[in-house]
Image (tube, rainbow, N blue to C red):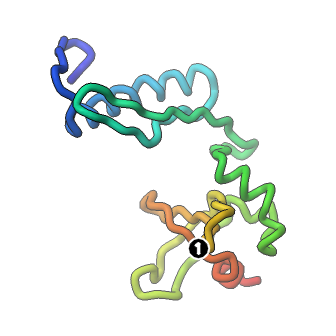
Amino acid sequence: MTTSEKVKVDKVTKDVCRKLRERLDECLKGLGEEIGMNVVSRSGTYSETHFNVKVEFAVFSEDGNVMTPDAEAFLQLCQFVELKPEDLWQTFESRQTFECQGHIYTIIGMKPRSQYSILGRREDGRVYKWKPEDVKKLLKR
């Protein structure tokens, strides 16, 4: 599905949703550049007749990081788990478990209702949840 070809969709399938989302992400990237915000598609649902997707608009921090709701939650609530606002975007290396050994993670936010509330993005882009006490140890505090 490209911008030049016209296609009539008779039934919404997972493959159709994937292709539509790819096109949407291209359009959202251009919009984000135009308005100076990070604009991305998020979770969605579909049936045979329709497809819904969430779109998130987020400003950039002074140092160029995306201020997501999770990053904002971290800034507001980090002191309750004995972390500091400046810990947001800090990196740490995990050597605690075999499956995480040697990976570098960046703190990107917080899910306050979870026991594993600190969000860390690995260098490959995958996001993992961590217990605050584990993050403090890995930050060497």
Q: Along the line of sight, which residue is nearer the eye, 30 or 110?
A: 110
Tell me which corner region of the image, top left, top right, bottom left or bottom right, holds residue 15: top left
Instruction: Identify the residue shown where x is 62% and y is 22%.
Output: 35
Q: Position of residue 117 (x, y in %)?
A: 63, 68
- Above/below status of 34 relative to 62: above
Circle 1 residues within 10 Å: few <14, some 14–19, many ≥20:
some
SS for callout 1: strand
Tell me which corner region of the image, top left, top right, bottom left or bottom right, holds residue 24: top left
- Above/below status of 116 relative to 57: below
Point out the image quarter for the C terminus: bottom right
- Above/below status of 62 relative to 98: above
Q: Position of residue 1 (x, y in %)?
A: 20, 24
Instruction: Identify the residue shown where x is 23% and y is 21%.
Output: 2
Q: Is residue 117 left or right of residue 72?
A: left
Q: Amino acid at mark 1?
A: Trp
The residue wearing badge 1 is 130
Q: Is residue 58 left or right of residue 7?
A: right
Tell me which corner region of the image, top left, top right, bottom left or bottom right, holds residue 45: top left
Instruction: Identify the residue shown where x is 63% and y is 63%.
Output: 107
